[in-house]
Image: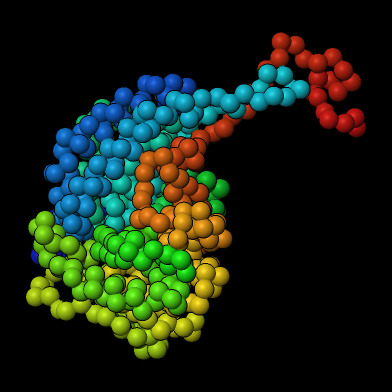
Amino acid sequence: MAYQTTNPYTNEVVKTYENATPEYVEESLAKAQKLYKEWRNDPVATRVPVLHRLAQLFRDEADSLAKVLTTEMGKLFTEAQGEVELCAMIADYYADHAEEMLKPRAIETIAGEAQLENHPLGVLMAVEPWNFPYYQMMRIFAPNFAVGDPIVFKHAAITPGSALAFEDAVRRAGAPDGSLTNLFLSYDQVSQVVADKRVQGVALTGSERGGVAVAEVAGKYLKKNTMELGGVDAFIVAEDANMADVNAVAPRARLYNAGQVCTSSKRFIVTANHYDEFLESLKAAFGSVKLGDPMDPTTTLAPMNSKKAKEKLQAQVDEAIAGGATAYFVHDAVASDGQFFLPTILTDIDKDNPAYGKEMFGPVAQVYKVANDDEAVELANDADYGLGGIVFAGSAESGAALASRIETGMVFVNTFFSSLPELEFGGVKKSGFGRELGQTGISSFVNQELVVKREHPNDDETGGLILPHKF
């Protein structure tokens, strides 16, 4: 695996990096394990000031950090700035709330005085993707740093500069050596690290294929793990939806970050009474985007992350059309050698089409026509994935009722999807398992240790062991 920064707008190879040596991997794991033992019984309060300093650093250096993202994976500079701010929010959130979230929980029991204590689990391995290089790392780093779990991580091969920038920011915020260590690993090395007895948990965000490979190793060695593996999120336009609201949100729900978002709306499921209007509005919005330099504030659609990703998406579109889909709209060509994918709208996709239920990671919208709300929910659930979704209905209450019938991890009613520190993030089915962010996110990799105490053992026929029934 070659770790290399290639600007997808200019196609310039900026820098190439060597893989981590076995010696460096061993040194990194040893440092992390040593730190875990030091942290094991330290109070959370000793670590949270680092998170506040990290948040401030991200805000103070927002533009320089954002430029790294734009250079490496082509993200619009304005969107990159937003990602940096979200990272600062996450760091502050766990600095403010970690102590309360991790405090012991008393349990009423006849066994004695009992409480559930939250202790660090140990060294964690994180495998993270290229589409939100800082945010994905902050999502796993901030809560687990507060817990006291050191992390070694493998970032995407096309965003090595982002990995190093994040690691450096954590170091400069005052985190102890070993808190977070970037490793440029080969696939074989990833398996070796997961298998290492010092590693107690694995967090992965990425493709289904990558998740299966890492989860297989984690399962073999009995390592706790969380998986976020993408989705084919539905955007339902209900029979009573307000179309002015729908038309304002739908284009952004597909084109944000050039459509390279796990939770972006990939399947627009529209009731018959709104279908024609929806298509015309989406076509106009897709046709009006400006493809260009992602550093230019007037650009509204950035290039895709790489030539490989662009070619894969084009192959998916070609296969869908060959299978009977209609290319209802394709954006005019752009005079650029950058890795731009022309915004495309596909219709007439039946269940036999290769595109049905498949994730298209880029600016391609699949639009489906259904008779009513019940059919919309049925189609939304007819997928192997279940990460997120959006529902637009005549009222928040009726939309929430539809949302509750969808087999997915997150649904946003009458609004754009969002990620905030306090909102748990994760999915079901092949979209993975476990949650990040919020209360659940900080609990994913803790040792919930039960402690029961009495002044003296019970004096009964059980020899001090309290049983609910006599045996």
Q: Residue at x 49, y 28 (%)?
A: 102
Residue at 19% across / 64% down in the picture?
Answer: 301
Q: Is residue 175 above or below residue 224?
A: above
Which is nearer the eye, 129 or 407?
407
The quadrant the C terminus occupies is: top right
Can residue 409 be seen here? no
Q: Position of residue 308 (x, y in %)?
A: 25, 71
Tell me if residue 179 comes above or below residue 63 in the rendering. Answer: above
Of the 4 image quadrants, the one containing the N terminus is bottom left
- Residue depicted at x 16% and y 35%: 60
User: 301 and 459: which one is in front?
Assistant: 301
Q: Is residue 155 visible?
A: yes
Is residue 331 placed above or below 141 in the rendered structure? below
Place residue 368 in its image quadrant.
Answer: bottom left
Q: Residue at x 39, y 21 (%)?
A: 45
The quadrant where residue 358 appears: bottom left
Which percent across, then down, holds residue 439?
48, 37
Residues 148 and 189: in front is 148
> Where in the figure is residue 306, as x and y percent of width and height?
22, 66
Q: Is residue 269 left or right of residue 309?
A: right
Place residue 3 in its image quadrant: bottom left
Q: Position of residue 418 (x, y in %)?
A: 36, 51
234 vs 433, nearest the viewer: 234
Q: Colour scheme used in the picture?
A: rainbow
Residue furthest to the top: 455
